Image (spheres, grey):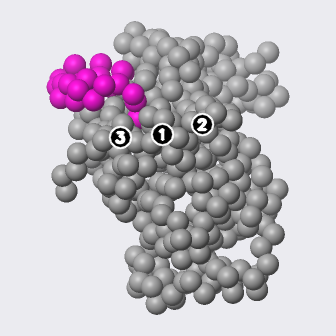
Amino acid sequence: MTYHPKSDFIAVMMERGFLADCTDYQALDDAALKGGMPGYIGFDATAKSLHVGSLIQIMMLRWLQKTGGKPITLMGGGTTKVGDPSFRADERPLLTPAQIDDNIAGIKKVFSAYLTYGDGPSDALMINNAEWLDDLNYLEFLRDIGRHFSVNRMLAFESVKSRLDREQSLSFLEFNYMILQAYDFLELNRRYGCVLQMGGSDQWGNIVNGIDLTRRVLDNQIFGLTSPLLTTSDGKKMGKSADGAVWLNPDMRSPYEFWQFWRNTTDADVGRFLKLYTEMPVDECERLGALAGSEINEAKVILANEITRLCHGAEAAQTAEATSREVFERGGVGDDLPTLELTREELGDGLSIVQAIVRAGLAKSGKDAKRLISENGAKIDDAPLSDAGLMLDAAALSSPVKLSAGKKRHALIVLKG
């Protein structure tokens, strides 16, 4: 559809590629135009950090704040105890309350880099849905809330239907998740005046449920807006790399490795990622994305710098770029490479090169490391590594040893003391 927005918020969502669908463009646009519009996204605490797959949602909240709205980051302290079954083949492992609290503490760290929290009209709020879910009375909840849900309709949602069509078990616990998420929207509207829920397009059914429930119980008008489910141009899901999830917390993924992930973006994705993950003007994003040859590589450096600056700060971005240029352009070691430090006690009589590759994070297992070596994908101090039986002893580690997997992934082995 062609829609010409009046509010800055909807304009940004549309021109930068954040918008997949919306329940009512015109009414939401009018609400955003008034300023101070509260909108939320929920984040379940299934790990100690979010990964780059969540970055599109975080940027949506950032743009909501930058255009005068009031972002709410909803921590799923309650819903994580159930687990979102949407488009999953199996049930999530159940976490203890202590694990959930620990995960929430880790997740909170990244939001302060993107949002300003406080008591002002456009200051962000951080809320935990355990505030209302933990003390629910089951019978009252069934009578007051459950009666508004049609099982027939719930079974028709694609996230549920796809699981049942594959004859994969869907527990009653998981089936309740969409009711709890709908109830979150109702409570956020009642307690905080929240009128907008955002999320990935896989959350459309859950968002519509919340809108319908709030209309039935409170007779209030609220809205839903979804972003595209993002994949790279070669079809890979955002958030993953060759060596696992690309976490946003620096203690789980170093700023250098984070920077390097974005530097390795496929040419075809550069313009789109600049629009989604940076605040550079749209026309400049498109100009950089249209470059070719060696010039597109400099655009990737700009992409990596801008995203790392937002997430980890300007100094981390500068250090990561300097390390990358040292490693790739001048063949050096670089000061900020991922480093495995060994004591002389840990080293003992020596460490096999296979285990060194695994422990440095360049392979997931000894089998993967041996395959890397046999396929000529490994290097030691920039020289081809062909001997899977090589042992690193104290003499070999008298100075730092650089290991490489392919052209883009490197690590150092350092002997302490």
Is residue 26 at least partly visible in the picture?
yes
Instruction: Give the residue pinned by disc 1.
Output: 35
The span from disc 3 to disc 2 (Cα, nearest Å) is: 17 Å
- Of the residues shown, which amino acid type is indicated by label 1? Gly
- The percent position of residue 265, horizontal first and vertical second, equals 34, 35
281 or 257, which lies in front?
281
Left or right? Give the position of 266 relative to 93.
left
Is residue 410 at least partly visible in the picture?
no
N-terminal-most mark, 3 or 1 = 3
The span from disc 3 to disc 1 (Cα, nearest Å) is: 9 Å
Name the residue at 56% across, 43% down: 71
Quadrant in which residue 60 is drawn: top left
Does 386 sit above or below residue 23?
Answer: above
Name the residue at 27% across, 39% down: 15
Give the overall secondary structure of the magenta segment: helix
- The percent position of residue 282, horizontal first and vertical second, equals 27, 29
User: Within 10 angstroms of label 3, few (less than 14), some, or many (20 or more) residues?
Assistant: some
3 and 2 marks in contact (CB < 8 Å): no
- Of the residues shown, which amino acid type is indicated by label 2? Pro
Does 296 sit above or below residue 21?
Answer: above
Does 382 sit above or below residue 117?
Answer: above
N-terminal-most mark, 3 or 2 = 3
Residue 284 located within the stretch drawn in magenta: yes
Query: SS for tag 2?
Result: loop
238 or 71, which lies in front?
71
Instruction: Give the residue pinned by disc 2.
Output: 121
Instruction: Give the residue pinned by disc 3.
Output: 7
Left or right? Give the position of 391 relative to 18.
right
Q: Count all numbered tags in the image, as a single digit.
A: 3
N-terminal-most mark, 1 or 2 = 1
User: Within 10 angstroms of label 1, few (less than 14), some, or many (20 or more) residues?
Assistant: some
Instruction: Give the residues drawn in magenta, as a range.
Output: 277-302
